[in-house]
Image (cartoon, rainbow, N blue to C red):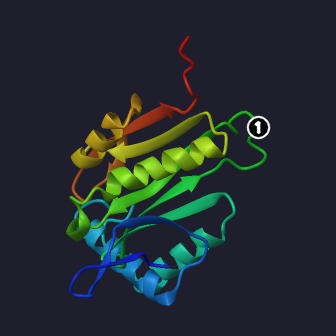
Amino acid sequence: MRPEIMDDSNKPILQPVIELMDDISDRDLEDLCIAVDEAVLDGNGFGWLKPPERSKQKSFWRGVVTMPMRELYCARFEGRIVGSAQLIKPFANNEAGAHIANISTFFIAPYARGHGLAIGMLEVLVQSARKQGFKALEVDVRETQKAAISLIENSGFVRWGVKKKYAWNGERFVSGFYYTKDLEEVVKL
């Protein structure tokens, strides 16, 4: 369901929204693939150096929504999906790390940036992880993604490590930064 607000001219104004995707329609899937293509071309392809074939992308995203240990959140702007992020929960056999969730495939397409969608998406992920009882939330990002680094650091994530040769960007190796956020509530006396 897309929220709509009517203005004086009776034209629908589609508000930006972050939503959990339990299923994904063909139209939403196409929008997501277009957003991925643009993000990859902009250097934010969460592993891809060039936009993958559409059939591979569609298979990837359809697989994501079927995996019980993954929650796919999508950002909508003007009614269309323009970005995503996944909250990845640990497998049941990972008792020692059962308290940690991870963020993956976090991006907003270049044409939809500057509207608060990234910060909104990050907050939704933090709240979902907290509500599910996770004690920490982790994310990693390439050193070249300055806006993402700023967002993550300004949202209370702490850098705990740097990995050299984290990723190949097509021309050179780049380092990766690893972040964690403590989700436990601090009780003030």
Quadrant of residue 131 within the rendered picture: top right
On the image, the x and y values in percent for residue 36 come to: 35, 71
- The local secondary structure at tag 1 comes to loop
Q: Residue furthest front?
A: 8
On the image, the x and y values in percent for residue 72 come to: 53, 64
Residue at figure coordinates x 78%, y 45% from the top left: 93
- Write down the residue under mark 1: 95
Q: Residues within 10 Å of mark 1 (few under 14, many from 20)?
A: few
On the image, the x and y values in percent for residue 127 come to: 53, 46
Is 48 situated left or right of 85 in this image? left
Is 77 situated left or right of 73 in this image? left
Residue at figure coordinates x 50%, y 44% from the top left: 126
Residue at figure coordinates x 26%, y 40% from the top left: 150
Front-lying residue, 148 or 6: 6
Quadrant of residue 82 within the rendered picture: bottom left
Q: Is residue 138 above or below residue 105?
A: above
Is 19 situated left or right of 114 in this image? right
